[in-house]
Image (tube, grey):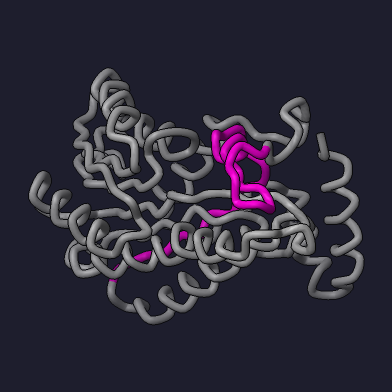
Amino acid sequence: MPPMQGKTVVITGASSGIGEELAVALAGRGAQVVLAARSEAELERVKQRCAQAGGRAVVVPTDVGDPEACRRLVARAVEAFGGIDCFVNNAGIAMRGRFEDVTDLSIFERLMRVNYLGAVYCTHAALPYVKARKGQLVAISSLTGKNGVPTRSGYAATKHAMQGFFDSLRIELSGTGVDVLVVSPGFVVSNIRARALGPDGSAGHADIAEEKGNRVMDTRTCVALILRAMERRERELVMMPAAKLMLAVKALVPGVIDRLASRMMKQVKP
């Protein structure tokens, strides 16, 4: 039986981007998919795509920043499919702007509540069911969770928190049969960039230049890599070979990586 055939997978942030394409790909592999995001209309659209791919999906409108909403999401998944084999924490919002230009510090609380605490709330609610099936927890993090990036201080902080949380949880779950995968993409084609928050807290600040095809991975390629890592029950997925090299160099000469990160962001600035 294919690894995902008949498995129940919950995906947050499933209304667009990586979450949407991952849901459709899983449905095509025979998984039962639970779609979570704030927009019910967008989730219904994704549900139709899952059905066309040959899979079953249910829609659960969810604000992951609300602990009770996360508990309802898990309860609905269990009600619909009897349990949870895999929980994918993908919901997130981005931010762009130099820290000294920030005029609304509540942005940092908002980012932390969605990107980090949302994963904590959902994972806490889902964990008993994932353990019962010796399943898998997946965290869609970012390369900014490995190394700081200029103009992304708030976003990078949430991804560092996510990395630390799931690394710690992996150790706690050793011997239970539950695997923890942390995914660290680079720049991926996604609506998250178009909706990025600016220094004043307003949305719609483009994250990076759209016309950098050699630097931006298409969503389907990203999802294919994630699926392979999930099926292999891997613990870590750093997508870009150059990023792997940078992380190795960082351990030896961290100042060089800081300069490279600064130069890279200047190159992709619109």
In the image, is 233 to the left or to the right of 4? right
| Stretch in magenta | 177-205
Residue at x 74%, y 52% (from the top left corner): 97
Residue at x 10%, y 44% (from the top left corner): 80
Residue at x 21%, y 61% (from the top left corner): 71
- The quadrant of the image that shows the C terminus is top right
In front here: 84 or 196? 196
Q: Position of residue 231 (x, y in %)?
A: 39, 48
Q: Position of residue 43 (x, y in %)?
A: 31, 32
Q: Look at the image and say whether residue 197 sits in the magenta stretch.
A: yes
Q: Look at the image and say whether residue 118 sits in the magenta stretch.
A: no
Q: Position of residue 229 (x, y in %)?
A: 48, 49
In front here: 193 or 228? 193
List the single residue furthest toward the bottom: 172
In front here: 241 or 212? 212
- The quadrant of the image that shows the N terminus is top left
In front here: 191 or 88? 191
Question: Residue 202's image quarter?
Answer: top right
Residue at x 79%, y 57% (from the top left corner): 150
Q: Position of residue 205 (x, y in %)?
A: 66, 39
Question: Residue 104's image quarter?
Answer: bottom right
In the displayed structure, 137 sits above or below 13; it is below
Q: Is residue 269 visible?
A: yes
In the image, is 65 to the left or to the right of 208? left
In the image, is 53 to the left or to the right of 206? left
List the single residue furthest toward the top: 52
Q: Is residue 145 visible?
A: no
